[in-house]
Image (cartoon, coloured by chain):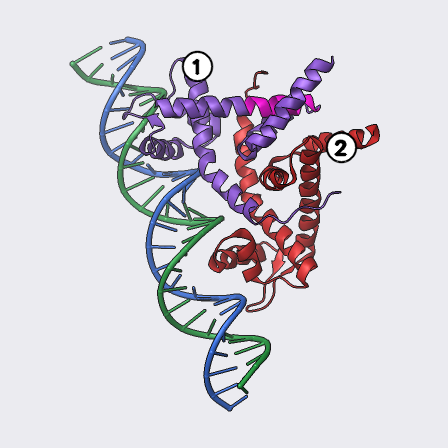
Chain colours: A purple, B red, C blue, D green
Amino acid sequence: MSKLPSTKDSYSRTRQDHSTETAEDYVEAIFDTIEAKGACRAVDLAEQFGVSHVTVSKIISRLDTDGLVEAPAYKPIGLTPEGKLMAARVRKRHELVYSFLIAIGVDAKTAAIDSEGIEHHVSTKTLARMRAFIEERSADR
Amino acid sequence: MSKLPSTKDSYSRTRQDHSTETAEDYVEAIFDTIEAKGACRAVDLAEQFGVSHVTVSKIISRLDTDGLVEAPAYKPIGLTPEGKLMAARVRKRHELVYSFLIAIGVDAKTAAIDSEGIEHHVSTKTLARMRAFIEERSADR
DNA sequence: TTGTCATTGTAGCCATTGCTACAAATCAAC
DNA sequence: GTTGATTTGTAGCAATGGCTACAATGACAA
């Protein structure tokens, strides 16, 4: 097994990822929900994430402050242009990671779960390798 | 691009991962440091993780309560048998993910950073596929 | 022995992400 | 238009992981 290079910054990178993870998960879920149901309510997110509506409410107001969502009181949740950009980018990445896991032979259910956890920690360089791998495989057959 | 199956439990799995992530990172770092320097002090961990010694101190006392480390006041930090088991398991997984990234063509530095973020979210099923991939590739050449 | 310096602990603060319990607003149905 | 259910908001609490500032411990040199 290969030796792991010493990497002082790996941990701080991971910690940094965590701070944006929540935002990414939420804008992606809002994007998908609007697409699927025409509108997104806090209760939809609470159901999807398996948390209480209070937790959703708090996170949404932070995302509002950060300029990612528009959340008028007692009304459906929308995405700002910036939020839409982030959602599109995240979904693309998420789908790519999922497809990659499928391509190496992981079953659909496991790929769905793992891709959700993994996606936030994959750099653009690694993403590029995953994309290349999928394309090579689809060209081979 | 493939469709993502709806997965109610992906998010709760990810949240669950996060609660063990810190413990895994710490026992792994303690294991490695003891191996490299003969002993592990809180200050070593603070340096590795890029956090203050206070943060380390708090986390170590929680791991002590959880039975993963032995941390007598003002003395080096040791692992309990349970902590050693966890460390060995985590390091194996970490190395496997790292080797897999290398195998798909990711450069060493990126692989080191990404494997650190990814490793906590990879299921045993996906790990098995990664292992199989590495073995196939090394058999091919 | 005493003093200094590196290390660890403690006090107390903040933000984030969880929760329950209760209050307020909206919507649909009658 | 009132009623009742669904949806949001607010208050207040806990755990985790950050921090600074200051106190205590330990080890080594003078």
Q: Look at the numbered disc 1 and give the secondary structure of its residue.
A: helix
Confirm whether circles 2 and 1 share one chain: no
Give residue B13's position: percent from left, percent from top. Answer: 56, 34
Name the amino acid type tagged 1: Glu
The image shows residue B129, relative to residue B71, as above or below, that is above
Chain letter of mark 2 equals B
Q: Where A111 sits versus A22, above or below? A: above
- Say which of B44 and A46 sits in front: B44
Q: CA distance from mark 2 to mark 1?
A: 39 Å
From the viewer's perspective, is D7 left or right of B130? left
Residue B59 in view of the camera? yes
Task: Where is residue A104? Give x, y as percent.
Answer: 70, 24
Residue linked to disc 2: B134
Q: Which mark is residue A35?
A: 1
| The C terminus of chain A lies in quadrant | top right
The residue sitting at 63% across, 27% down in the picture is A129
Mark 2 belongs to which amino acid? Ile
Q: Is A40 situated above or below B72?
A: above
Q: Which residues are magenta?
A: A94-104
Q: Residues within 10 Å of mark 2 (few under 14, many from 20)?
A: some
- Residue at 54% x, 52% y: name it: B49
Dividing the picture into quadrants, the one containing residue A93 is top right
Q: Give the class, few, some or many, for how many residues have Cα within 10 Å of label 1's Cα (few <14, many ≥20).
A: few
| Residue A128 image-quadrant placement | top right
Quadrant position of residue B74: bottom right
What x and y, as percent, mark residue A1? 75, 42
Q: Is residue A96 magenta?
A: yes
